[in-house]
Image (cartoon, helix red, strand yellow):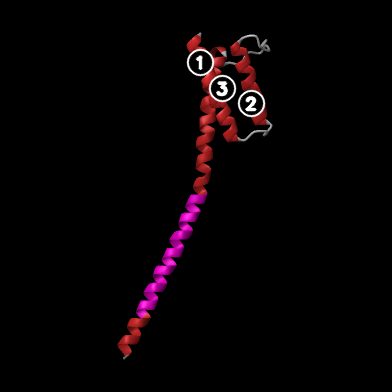
Amino acid sequence: MDVNIYIALGAVVIVAIIVLNHQKQKNKMKTMLGEAGGTQLIFLTKAVEKKNKALADILYDGGIKPSAANTGTTHKDMLIKQLEKLEKEFAAKKISLRTYDEQLFDLLEKANKLVVVA
């Protein structure tokens, strides 16, 4: 009879260890996924930086912004004004990073068409 008690207690201990281990792993996974949430922001920021550099290379001569104000008469000048407006809105936190990225993508597509036509 004593053996049955030890077997029952052993089974209870094993089940308790399994349940505790499962809870511990679940908490680790939640923590890891929570920390990984910032990773997407890093990739999005890098994408925005690359798009800004590509736009500067296309729209500005040698990637350097001109000191004189543009007249807005050519298609290129209009794209520069749109880029400057986007930069100001993002700097003032009027638009989110994701929206800024999407609008930069659209602007980059327009600028690439400008390069093909020119």
Type of amino acid under label 1:
Lys
Residue 78 within the magenta-colored segment of the rendering:
no
State left or right for residue 43 relative to residue 69. left
Q: Are marks 2 and 1 in contact (CB under 8 Å)?
A: no
Q: Residues within 10 Å of mark 3 (few under 14, many from 20)?
A: many
N-term-proximal mark, 1 vs 3? 3
Residue stretch rendered in magenta on the structure: 10-34
Query: Tag 1's secondary structure?
Result: helix
Query: Tag 3's secondary structure?
Result: helix
Type of amino acid under label 2:
Glu
Type of amino acid under label 3:
Leu
What residue would you read off at disc 1?
113
Q: Residue at x 51, y 32 (%)?
A: 46
In the current view of this chain or complex, which residue is farthest to the bottom? 1
Q: Residue at x 30, y 87 (%)?
A: 3
Q: Are marks 3 and 2 in contact (CB under 8 Å)?
A: no
Q: Position of residue 15 (x, y in %)?
A: 39, 73
N-term-proximal mark, 3 vs 2? 2
Identify the image quadrant of residue 86: top right
N-term-proximal mark, 2 vs 1? 2
Q: CA distance from mark 3 to mark 2?
A: 12 Å
Q: Position of residue 2 (x, y in %)?
A: 32, 90
What residue would you read off at disc 3?
107
Q: Residue at x 57, y 14 (%)?
A: 60
Q: Residues within 10 Å of mark 2 (few under 14, many from 20)?
A: some
Q: Give the main secondary structure, helix, strand or loop, of the magenta stretch.
A: helix
Query: Tag 2's secondary structure?
Result: helix
Q: Residues within 10 Å of mark 1 (few under 14, many from 20)?
A: few
Q: Residue at x 50, y 42 (%)?
A: 39
What residue would you read off at disc 2?
87
Q: Mark 3 or mark 2: which is in front? A: 3
